[in-house]
Image (spheres, helix red, strand yellow):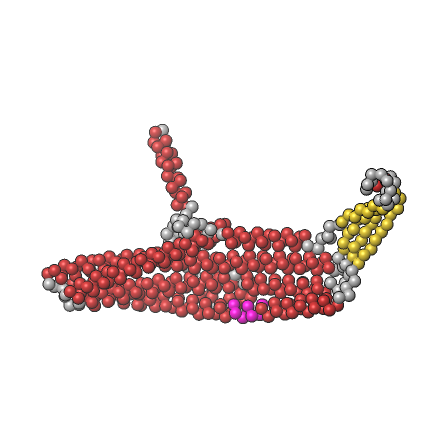
Amino acid sequence: MGNSIKLLFMALLFAPVAWADVAVPGATLPGLLQWLEQDSAELAAMRHEAAGAELRAEAAGALPDPSLRIEWGGLNRSGVPLDPSRVDATKYTVLQPVPGWGKRDAQKQAAQAGAALAGAQQRAVGAELRARMTLAFAQYYQSQRALALNDEFGGFTDSAAKLVQSRYETGAATQQELVRAQLEQAAQQSERLQLQSDLAQAQARINALLNRPAHAALASPEVLPEPPAAARLEGSALEQRLRDANPQLAGQAAQTDLAQRNAELAQRNLSPDFILGIAPVQRGNGIRSLDAMLEFTLPLQQVAHHAHQHEASEMVDASRARQQAAETRLLGELREHLAALEAARAQQALLHQRVSPLAELAFKGALAGNQSGRVDFATLLEARRQLQKTRLDELGAEVAQQLHLAEIERLIGGQP
């Protein structure tokens, strides 16, 4: 019984710590994207705007509110002012405005087009934010891995500086070699400061996207998402997906539809609007008669109406032109990112399969030669620096793939 109580106590003691670890984002990109969907203030604002546009569409096309008009006749009579029983007559007129034929339907369709536009804009903002989060996570991962490589390189420069210092004291190394080692050590430390700044900037970008304080804790990035197979990156198929699902194109198509609906409404404005009225008339204590009224507008200002029609038509043409221009531009961006992605993939394969093994072999040979006295310190340092550069280049090529993939996903509206 005592052991059971002890185990229960330990579980309760450490449970909050475990939960705190789970509750900290940053380890993986899918986890960050989930946090983004839940906590992004910008996404929340767009959701509210889209919901508001849907509600406006529901209310569009309804009849305007009626109005009530009360008229008192014969106020010159003595008695209580405005008392219906003490004036000649009191007329109660209920007025109901009624838009002309087809105008309510046109207003409804225009509002529905506006709601579709708001929904497309929401999806476009979501795609943009997901792409920005992917870029920020890739840079976060790159900074963290580059810092680890910098630490490894710093271990070498520290050991090398101590060794050269020892040799210099015994006369086995020159002052130039000692200065060279110390300069390399300082350069590594300077690079580390820059990498720490890059890491802090990436963390701040991620927290800003998540609507968190800039210095809020983030988990260390674990791994980058696996790039899709080359077969899933076929250009023609992705171009068709862009035409079908790109949020910006969808928004531009909704804008064109809205312009067309507004043009239809401008055409409907050539017909009159109506006001219907019914007016019970009270004399004394009872309703003695009933009047009816019909009022309608006379669309005689043809110059103004035709100007509005032409304006609406021009806006439709402009929106169609923008839609075509956007499609052409986005297709060009897609091809650019596909070409850059393929180049980064090939560069990473080359670095990983050929350049990195050769740089590792060259460094090991230089290290053995330096220990035996056959290779000078400058050659050893150059070999180690080349190995460091190769590792950073491979990391950069891996991250570059993620950057271009993020842009491709933004363009086609989802993962390839």
| Quarter of the rendering containing residue 185 | bottom left
From the top left corner, tell me how far across and down residue 343 is, in percent.
40, 69
Asked if residue 192 lies left or right of residue 26, the reply is left
Examine the rendered structure and indicate whether residue 354 appears above or below residue 39: below
Front in this rendered view, residue 28 or 203: 203
From the top left corner, tell me how far across and down residue 5 is, in percent.
37, 31
Front in this rendered view, residue 266 or 299: 299
Q: What residue is shown at x 48% (from left), y 64% (from top)?
A: 408
Q: What residue is shown at x 77% (from left), y 64% (from top)?
A: 299
Farthest residue, direction left: 170
Asked if residue 192 lies left or right of residue 134, the reply is left
Q: What residue is shown at x 61% (from left), y 69% (from top)?
A: 318
Asked if residue 285 lies left or right of residue 160, the reply is right
Front in this rendered view, residue 37 or 8: 37
Q: What residue is shown at x 36% (from left), y 66% (from top)?
A: 348
Asked if residue 232 lies left or right of residue 314, the reply is left
Q: Main secondary structure of the magenta part?
A: helix
Q: Does the rendering let one see residue 287?
A: no
| Quarter of the rendering containing residue 202 | bottom left
From the top left corner, tell me how far across and down residue 56 is, in percent.
65, 53
* Magenta-tinted stretch: 323-330
Q: Does the rendering let one see residue 135?
A: yes
